[in-house]
Structure formats: C-alpha cells, structure tokens
C-alpha cells in the first residue's frame, strides 16, 4: 500500500486484536486510527482486553448512522492532530539541531576574536565567556558565578548599575 488510510473500520466478524496489530505497525509513523465494531450482544472491551487490542475506539451494534459518523470524524481529527504533532516534533528537532550548530559556530568565532566576548540570557545570567576572558582574568568560565568579585572594588557599583540597566532594557552593556 503506497498511501495508508487515515481510518480503518473493522467489522464484528474480523479477529479484532490480531488484525489491529497487523494494521498498526510499530515501525510505521503514520498508523491509521482503528474503529472496531463489536457484534450485537458483545460487551465493550475493558481493562487489558481494551488496552491490548490496538483499536482506538469501539462501537457496539446496532449503530446509528450519526453515531458512526461522529466517531469517524473524531478519530479523523485525532489522526490529523497526531500527524501535525509529528510534523511539529520533527520541525523542532531540526530547529534544535540548527540552533546547536549555530551556537557551536558562534563559540568558535568568539574564541578566535582577540576581544573578551560574553553572552547573557534575558535574565542577566551570563551563559558564555570566550577563551580570552579566561586568559585575561585567569579564571575559569565557571568562576563567573563569583559575581562581581573579578571587578575592581572601585568599579563594582557603577558596573552593577550599568549591568542592571542593560538587563532591564535588554540593551547593550
């Protein structure tokens, strides 16, 4: 089958669990929704039977047309949402990989620059120092947690006020 269906209706005469498992392939990303029709007098699956059947919904005969249509529409919307979620997850994974590559390129360039370079999150927490910072201060980047101890005592107050203003305005420091 080249195009997989979005919804499969299984009649009450089929061996439900085995057929559901054959239709829902664990290695396939785009499995159809399965609406299992239960024969007249058969109870709806509960507990382990319901969980193990791989059907997404069940209806018991006799079934009204509007009930079947409503169940089918609900399952088709769920299938569309699953596909959209899968697309968004793939897009997010791709974006995250691109962001990580961009971060790595930035760090490489920042470490090649002869100046001290650092970046901070919008909260003001410094999240990157280049190698020149470590060479200049003699401290490891983890020492940035020490706060303003690396700033000359005469400059600390002005530097803190300037930093706070830059963080508040999200402007340059």
Image (spheres, helix red, strand yellow):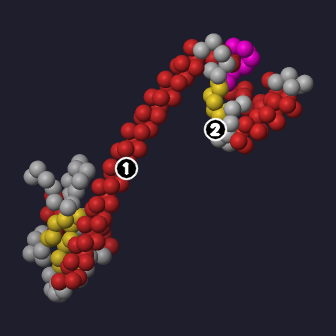
Residue appearing at x 77%, y 39% in the figure: 164
Check the image and report above or below for 56 versus 105: below
Numbered badge on residue 121: 2
Numbered badge on residue 124: none
Q: What stretch is highlighted in magenta?
A: 135-141
Callout 2: few (<14), some (14-19), or many (20+) C-alpha neighbours within 10 Å? few
Residue appearing at x 45%, y 28% in the figure: 101
Disc 1 is placed on an element classified as helix
For the C terminus, give its image quadrant. Answer: top right
Residue 139 within the segment the image draws in magenta: yes
Residue appearing at x 16%, y 60% in the figure: 5
Question: Camera-side residue: 107 or 43?
Answer: 107
Name the residue furthest right.
154
Q: What's the distance in space between the residues labelled 1 and 2, CA to CA? A: 25 Å
Instruction: Tell me residue 141's x, y (percent).
Output: 67, 24
Instruction: Tell me residue 54's x, y (percent).
Output: 24, 64
Circles 1, 2 touching at the beta carbon (< 8 Å): no
Residue 124 in view in this figure:
no
Give the mark, 1 or 2, whose residue is nearer the N terminus. Answer: 1
Look at mark 1 in the image and give the residue it sits on.
88
**Rendered image quadrant of residue 130:** top right
Callout 1: few (<14), some (14-19), or many (20+) C-alpha neighbours within 10 Å? few
Instruction: Tell me residue 56's x, y (percent).
Output: 26, 68
Check the image and report above or below for 14 versus 141: below
């Amino acid at each position: 089958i080249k195009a997989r269906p979005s919804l499969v209706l299984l009649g009450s005469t089929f061996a439900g669990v085995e057929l559901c498992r054959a239709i829902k392939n664990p290695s396939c990303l785009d499995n159809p929704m399965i609406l299992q029709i239960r024969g007249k007098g058969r109870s709806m699956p509960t507990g382990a039977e319901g969980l193990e059947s791989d059907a997404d919904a069940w209806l018991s005969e006799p079934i009204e047309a509007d009930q079947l249509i409503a169940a089918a529409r609900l399952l088709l919307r769920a299938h569309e949402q699953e596909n959209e979620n899968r697309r968004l997850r793939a897009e997010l994974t791709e974006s995250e990989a691109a962001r990580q590559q961009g971060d790595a390129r930035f760090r490489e360039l920042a470490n090649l620059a002869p100046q001290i370079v650092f970046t901070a999150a919008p909260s003001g927490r410094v999240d990157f120092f280049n190698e020149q910072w470590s060479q200049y201060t003699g401290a490891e980047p983890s020492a940035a947690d020490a706060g303003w101890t690396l700033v000359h005592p005469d400059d600390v107050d002005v530097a803190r006020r300037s930093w706070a203003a830059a963080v508040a305005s999200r402007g340059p420091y």
